[in-house]
Amino acid sequence: MAGATLKDIAREANVSIASASRAINGLDNVADDVKQRVLEIAKRLRYVPHGGARSLVMSRTNTIGVLLPDIYGEFFAEIIRGIDVAARARGLHLLVSGSHSNPDEALRIMRAMGGRVDGLLVMSPFVESHDLAAVLPLNLPVVTIASRIGADQRSISVDNFGGGVTAAGHLREQGCQRLAHISGPLRNFEAQERRRGFLSVCEGAPLFEGDFTEESGYRGAKAFLTLDERPDGIFAANDVMAVGCLLALREAGLTVPGDVAVVGFDDIPIARFTSPPLTTLRVGIFDLGRQGLEMLVAALEAGEQTASEGIIVTPELVMRDSSRHKSG
């Protein structure tokens, strides 16, 4: 239906024009079932708010919404730093929120940001996040970072499968024979892919499901040390877990990499300062944020005519002392 109006949306949804407007603008004073019905109808009828697509070109708030699964830790600090540097260069402000890894909370936050921001940067890497594609704010430019939200979204993603392959292959090249993996939470799509890449090289290797925290990396290494055949190479799915792993090995009186080689993922700033310095897969965390903001600005300037685009980042092996195996 071309040229649908708010009145058309309200009529088909059997609600008042005021209720339809509140639902489309993400306001809280409207029932959830009404919101869902109005948004579905508006999307189907390709409704464009008053002012048309050109309203996207003119920055009304000079504010960009940023939704991350968390805002704690070096990884997210680097993401935000990259976004912030690029935003300040363009005179833009940021409205940052964390979803606490809850897709339902992510949806509530995105709706709350409607009308307050000119565009959204969203990072929601959880398996359930693909459901968010159907309820993203209408006519609001969105760029996803390392997420699993709708194939038609502008996106920056990481080749996590390839990173897992590289990590396992590197440990093999360093002479490791008994590999093990501390994965991220399996409801995290990126963790799934890193694990899948690792297992494609060493099927049947011991696994421990962590949660991307130092404590889970510590527990994972402790668990591996109880095995009849102790691993001589461990791939942790992020650097934070690798830090916990290093502590557990040191407490057990083992040397790294002499007894056990360790590889992480992300290359957070602290990785080069661990003891020993951590071998890891660099994804350019700062640049993920910077490029995401730049892609979103390009979409705002081009308006609705801009095509969806995607960037895939290939992790780069950064070899440090934690994996320089005695036979390597």
Image: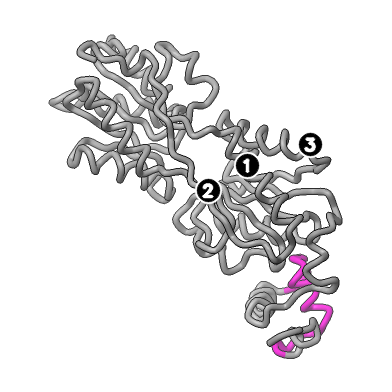
Q: Is residue 154 left or right of residue 258?
A: right
In the image, what residue occupies the spot 82% across and 64% down? 55
Residue kind at label 3, given as amino acid type? Arg
Residue 20 magenta-highlighted: yes
Quarter of the image for the N terminus: give it.
bottom right
Kindly report the distance in space between the C-alpha atoms of the residues bearing marks 1 and 2.
Answer: 9 Å
Residue kind at label 2, given as amino acid type? Ile
Q: Which residue is mark 3?
A: 88
Residue kind at label 1, given as amino acid type? Gln
Kindly report the distance in space between the C-alpha atoms of the residues bearing marks 2 and 3.
Answer: 23 Å
Magenta stretch? 12-30
Please tell me whether mark 2 sits on a helix, a strand or a loop.
Answer: strand
Q: Is residue 168 left or right of residue 186?
A: left
In the image, what residue occupies the spot 17% across and 41% down? 204
Q: Which residue is mark 2?
A: 311
Q: Which residue is mark 1?
A: 291
Position of residue 234 measured from the top left corner of the image (x, y, whole percent): 29, 27
Position of residue 8 measured from the top left corner of the image (x, y, whole percent): 76, 87
Q: Quadrant of residue 52?
A: bottom right
